[in-house]
Amino acid sequence: MLNFARCNGSQTVGRRYFSLLRDKNYIGGEWVAASSGKTFQVTNPVNDKVIGIAQDSTPEDAEKAIKVASGSFKMWADLPAKEKGIKLKSLLKLVNTHSDDLAKLITAECGKPLAEAKAEVMYSAGYLEWYAEEAKRIYGEVLAPPNNTRELVVLKEPIGVVGFITPWNFPLAMLVRKAAAALAAGCVCVARPAEDTPFSALALAALVEKAGFPAGTFNVVTSSRSQAGPIGQALCASPQVAGISFTGSTAVGKILYQQCANTVKRLGLELGGNASYIIFPTADLSRAVQGVMGSKFRNAGQACVATNRVLVHESVFDKFSSMLATAVKTQLVSGDGFDPAVNQGPLINEQQFQKVDGIVKDAVSKGARVVSGGGIHPTLKGRFYQPTVLSNITEDMKIYNEEIFGPICPLYKFYSEDEAVTIANSTRRGLANYFYSNDYAQVWRVAKRLESGMVGVNEGLISAAEAPFGGVKESGFGREGSRHGVDDYVHTKYVCFGGLQN
Ligand code: ADP
């Protein structure tokens, strides 16, 4: 296990463990300090030891980054698509070469087990590969004209400078899947990563630099939480920023939506979810248990597509809950993510920890039954919450309505397909839903009826670079990944060529 005891600054840690650790902003191809002269400490959520320092930037720094990005836009946009693809492929190669270093950084700053961090790096690489290829396939159209004097052509043009605001739970992947699509489309970027996890973004910038991207095409400005709002506002208010892409909470997404109104910006919002995971009577229960283990407990439940409520048909409820309780007790090991035996890390910060504890206490006080776990980890110090299974859940409990973002699995008993679908749809969120069934007519029917941007049928982990990721209702709009992922970064321009025949 790593010993952070001697680590009191980025240099020590950097030399020993993290070759890609950077402690400055990356603006215009240079590593620069924040204009305020201030920095903030980034800690490992396992033990609160300092991993390194990052720049506590202000809107002034964001504006500098916007300016240099803006200056590089035309040159990058005009580069042939093939050349953009080649640059993205160079970055892909470097991400693959440095996958171990990147994974260690992710584990250190966000606490997830190293195997999951490696999976996140590979997942990120998938987006780079996809968009390196997709750069050449951003097609326009030639339309059938209404008469022979005209030709009608549709062009796809990059929108310009885009701002990214990203979360801590997938600190590399959430940035890469935005940046890869935007760069492929010909846009240039200013990213402001989460304060808990700025180093993955800076490590990506270090690889962008190595890959030889032109200065100004990709910029990273870090800050503490206190500057998140002002920097977000600067990005939203700037007329030089053409679009914002945000992944994070619905509450912050709504603020950004309002802030973007004044400049009528393009916006992509990937917000919170409230995924149901439905087990119908014909489900293969063993597969359903394994599916929910991945969907619920990956990253200790800290994912927007994580299962939030498990709805189990009454005919299989007892059997499923006992199988799940056994799996939770025997398969999950909490601890430091650098320990290869561990598959459950801590919760990211105190606020998140208190929220999860509050949700469980609220449910238990209103009659929920603890099937497994049920509280703070009895032996581990820090913000470890026991993987928990609860039943007897009722609608008045917070857990019924709120996104949990923790390793808590509430089980509900349902009696009919209609009831299950109604419960799953009875939320303002609509990111992902999952269900298990081997009744093929039911599979198609339910897949169509569920109100979410994504549906997993007999699968608990569905995200892939090849597929469009995104939500409906208050889970946001815009799609990341797949050919649809470039749509947020291009304008559709119609050109009418007239006077062609007399
Ligand atoms: P979480 O609860 O998962 O931290 P948030 O939506 O609060 O989700 O945070 C996601 C990202 O948005 C983080 O990088 C955070 O610093 C940033 N953020 C928080 N508040 C604001 C804001 N008012 N404007 C812009 N960004 C913000």
Image (cartoon, rainbow, N blue to C red):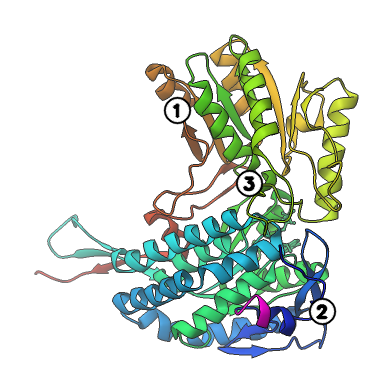
Which element is circle 2 on?
A: loop
Which element is circle 1 on?
A: helix
Q: Which residue is mark 2?
A: 8
State the separation of the CA atoms marked 2 and 1: 54 Å
Which kind of residue does numbered mark 1 sit on? Lys
Q: Which residue is mark 3?
A: 304
Q: Does the beta carbon of the residue at mark 3 sit less than 8 Å from ligand 1?
A: no
Q: Which quadrant, please, contains the N terminus?
A: bottom right
| Residue furthest right in the image | 365
Quadrant of the image occupied by residue 137: bottom left
Residue at left offset 37%, top offset 61%: 130
* Residue 394 rendering spot, x and y as whole percentages: 78, 20
Q: Which residue is mark 1?
A: 448
Residue at left offset 53%, top offset 17%: 280
Q: Nearer the viewer, mark 2 or mark 1?
A: 2
Q: Does the beta carbon of the residue at mark 1 sit less than 8 Å from ligand 1?
A: no
Which element is circle 3 on?
A: loop
Which kind of residue does numbered mark 2 sit on? Asn
Task: Check whether the beta carbons of the residues at disc 2 and disc 1 lie within 8 A of each other.
Answer: no
Q: Residues within 10 Å of mark 2 (few under 14, many from 20)?
A: some
Q: Which quadrant, please, contains the C terminus?
A: bottom left
Left or right side of 145 for 85: right
Which kind of residue does numbered mark 3 sit on? Cys
Q: Is residue 450 visible?
A: no
**Magenta segment boundaries in residue numbering:** 15-19
* In the rendered image, the vertical position of residue 148 relative to residue 82, given as above or below: above
Q: Is residue 317 visible?
A: yes
